Amino acid sequence: MRLSALRLSLLAVSVLPALVSADWYEAAGQAVLRAGDKVAARKAATEDAVRKALLYSGASIRTVQQVTDGLLTQESMFLHSQGEVQNVQIISETEENGYINVTIRADIYPDQNQCTNLRLKKQLLISPFVIENREQALVGQLYELDQASTNLFIQKLEESSSSSLLKLLPHPIRQQELSYADRGALQRNYGGRYLLKASLADLSLGERVGTNWTFWSDPDRERFYQLQLELSDIQQHKILFSQTYQTSAVWDLRETTVISPKTQRFWHTDYGKSIARVLNAAAQDVEEALRCEAVLADITLVDQHKVLLNLGSKQGLNIGDELSILYRRQHKDSFGQLQDQLTVSELKIKVTELTHNNAWAQSVNMDLLANVQVGDAATLVSNSK
């Protein structure tokens, strides 16, 4: 399967001088060409590209469908929306391997409600996807579809994400609820506060479709793909995003045909193309849900008026960044379960030394940090740039 490459360029363009300026973003999008309907495929590919441009600009992507309902032509799309996107131009379009690929330039206005900590990247732990009913994978021998879906989802998220660092866990997490100890162990061992879990809930075959009843071939059947996805903050023990995605496509292979989900042949089938579109949408939804979440640095060492943080240049921290210290205390919730409680203190620290993974920060007023303990946290309050 050919995956669309994301190309972004930024040109500052003054659209309304002295009032507000917009930026041009260039992005590539892709959509499956179904039944020769190029108009529908072009619109879907344009929507995909607009979503990517919005993500990289830091604007909201929740109204992309409304945004792309403007006047769409081969050359450009003039939008009726008065929101963040005012104009989209299609600058190139190609058709290849059953896909329509478009490159657009989008005129995006700054979002006044943009996240303040968008520059810093969150560590996202990804639990490998699991097939809930493995007998549904029998036809086609699709037992590796969970692993293949995981890999493609990660690739799609890397294409669309500017706010997260991804880490694939070695084994799936199957527990519905993680204990306080389990959540703490995940954070200590893998350095991530956010966890994504997903399962393939339905890979079943439906009724016969079409007229393929020849004696040498099995009848074509509809095949389903249902993805259940959950994004959670394991430190605060809360669900940030939960969604079920469903699609289906004609399965026109014989029941005895074996096709590996790790091959290009599988992803060139209508079923594979439909799955790829679902995974692309899911990746962009996860990015949207995660990007405005807080980035917290754990304090791993306290030395009089300075502390060592487990956050570094890899996450986007800079020399001179100022952070607030948060006291971390344990308490029991109404169910008797241990939870962390963070309380913002009046103490401020500034980054003075920086490595790839860590940073030293000292008290702004050179006060002794006597009440600060290992395990407390810090969060960005201002940027040096």
Image (cartoon, grey):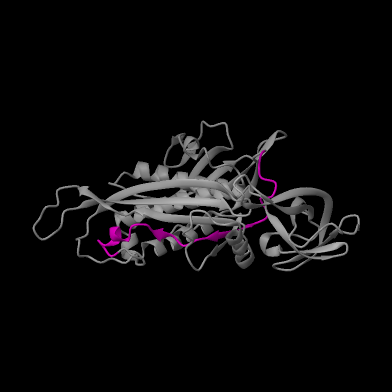
Determine whether, in the image, residue 222 is placed left or right of residue 99: left
- Res 144 seen here: yes
Label total for image: 0
Determine whether, in the image, residue 368 is placed left or right of residue 144: right
Determine whether, in the image, residue 114 is placed left or right of residue 262: right
Q: Residue furthest left?
A: 215
Identity of the residue drawn at 73% across and 60% down = 375
> Which image quarter holds the C terminus?
bottom right
Instruction: Name the spot of residue 84 as percent of width and height, x first.
Output: 59, 37
Which of 275 and 324 lies nearest the eye of the viewer? 324
Which of 241 and 274 lies nearest the eye of the viewer? 241
Which of 68 and 256 lies nearest the eye of the viewer? 256
Check residue 139 for magenta coloring: yes
Task: Please give the range of residues in magenta.
Answer: 113-141
Identity of the residue drawn at 86% across and 57% down = 363
- Res 1 seen here: no
Instruction: Name the spot of residue 43 as percent of width and height, x first.
Output: 41, 42
Instruction: Name the spot of residue 357 as percent of width and height, x first.
Output: 69, 67
Image vertical order of residue 45 relative to residue 298, above or below: above
Q: Residue furthest front?
A: 336
Dominant secondary structure (helix, strand or loop) of the stretch shown in magenta: loop
Which of 269 and 91 lies nearest the eye of the viewer? 269
Instruction: Name the spot of residue 95 as percent of width and height, x first.
Output: 36, 53
Check residue 197 for magenta coloring: no
Question: Hey, which quadrant is residue 189 in on the image?
Answer: bottom right
Identity of the residue drawn at 13% across and 59% down = 217
> Which image quarter holds the N terminus?
bottom left
